[in-house]
Amino acid sequence: MKFSLSLFVILAATAATAQTPLFERFFENKTLRVDYFHTGTATTEFVGLDQVYEEGAWAGSRKDLIDTLNRGKYLVKVFDVETNQLIYSRGFASIYGEWETTQEARDEKVRTFHESVLLPFSKKPVQVVLAKRDKWMHFQDIFSTVIDPSSRFVNREKRGRAFKVVNLLENGPPHQKVDFLLLGDGYSKDDMGKFRKDAQRWREVILRTSPFKENAGKLNIRAIEVISEDSGIDEPRKNLWKNTALGTSYNSFDSPRYVLTYENRTIRDIAAAAPYDFIYIMTNANRYGGGGIYQLYATGHTIEENPDLEWQLEYMITHEFGHSFAGLGDEYYSSSISYLDFYASGVEPWEANVTALLDPAELKWHSFTEENTPLPTPWSKAFFDSLEAVRRTWDRSKPGYYEKWDKLRVQQLEKMQQTEHYGKVGAFEGAGYSSAGLYRPAVDCRMFSRSLVPYDPVCSAAIREVINFYAE
């Protein structure tokens, strides 16, 4: 009888533990920030631990701890050391992951980038593993370290500088909502009035754009009033250099309009003042340019000198945020880029809105296509390409370039709208920087053309999936 009672107690305790939510069993309501250095070339790659930090309340979901979205070139996995149980994972992309596809990396020039992963703060020692997709899109482990959260090697200094945090939209606790954080770069103390207006415009753009609009109740939006010494950001091709808080710059990867910053540690230290899931950096700049990397950040200019091009600011916000928020791929293929073989031939990309169409019968977005839609799906590609060939002869630095591009775009759009399958989901050739061999879901989309055309159904669904994954 004694043995039976003991066994009952053990079984009851085991059952109770099994029913305890994963977050409560393994994590505290704090954030574990793991910083590391990512070094290499196109053919070699090394990851080295830098520093581990304890930060504020965990902003991510406490329910969806294991990644089911399957997006990103990299994956961070967290295992409980005692049981070897996977207790957290999240896919992401990185600057290094893009840079390794450039000519500089192919020329075996070694570069180092500073990166971070944010994890819920574990109660006991954990093994943190970084994995990377191989040529065939399978994740292979590239780095592993054990972290004891009670260790003296965990930096517990309070992160976050003395910049003002502003709530622009608050619908509930951070762990129950999707938390957007706006940072400004190139805003001096005298520019704070403009920063506040730019932040309000960003909020308005997001809340009127589907599918964010329909899910507004699941969002929180905050901004940090980051003050820089100088107004504006670096423009290396013009030999213009600004002392800014976040170090954003045009000409990233030697691409004139690509705006990134390599100051990851600074960004993370400043952002630590507020709970966040996704970061958007508004640059106090008047030249078209931005960028977006999945789960890292997005950037975008905030000034249009030509009132007729004011719509470009809205396009920039939503296009680049589509990259960083939902991992959407670029659907265009005619603009100049610095990447070489960004997508491996004969391999299905991980992005939700780009396909190699290796098996038309198993199209990744088949649930959105009508039964009689041909795959590949014909469209006015020859006409589109002929006008793009004309555009490439124009001098981008000359005044009026974007005005001329807009007129050309109208011609392209009118022709595309005459396509039999316009407004339908299919597999339209030309996507992911490749004119042939890669396909997009629709003739036109916010991820395809520089316009305010809506996200296509596939991109919209991908955005909703992320919203629902983070919002409880």
Image (cartoon, rainbow, N blue to C red):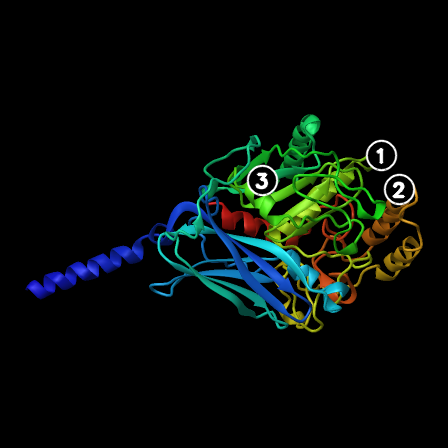
Amino acid at dot 2: Glu
User: Up-down: is 230 above or below 456?
Assistant: above
> Marks 3 and 1: in contact by CB < 8 Å?
no
CB under 8 Å between discs 3 and 2: no
* Quarter occupied by residue 313: top right
Real-space Cα separation, disc 1 to disc 2, in angstroms: 9 Å
Comparing labels 3 and 2, the label whose residue is closer to the camera: 3
User: Mark 2 = which residue?
Assistant: 403
Numbered mark located on residue 306 in the image: 1
For residue 181, the mark is 3
Q: Where is residue 81 in the image (x, y as percent from the top left)?
A: 37, 63
The secondary structure type at the circle numbered 1 is loop
Q: Do the residues labelled 1 and 2 touch (CB within 8 Å)?
A: yes
Q: Earlier in the sequence, mark 3 or mark 2?
A: 3
Residue at x-position 68% and y-position 67%: 41
**Mark 2 or mark 1, which is nearer the start of the sequence?**
1
- Give the amino acid at mark 1: Asn
Badge 3 marks a residue whose secondary structure is strand
Query: Where residue 388 appears, x then y in whole percent?
Result: 88, 56
In the depicted view, which residue is nearer to us: 286 or 472? 286
Examine the rendering and report whether any part of residue 374 can be seen.
no
Q: Which residue is drawn at 70% across and 66% down?
A: 343
Q: Residue drawn at (7%, 63%), measured in percent from left and top?
A: 2
10 Å neighbourhood of mark 3: few (<14), some, or many (≥20)? many
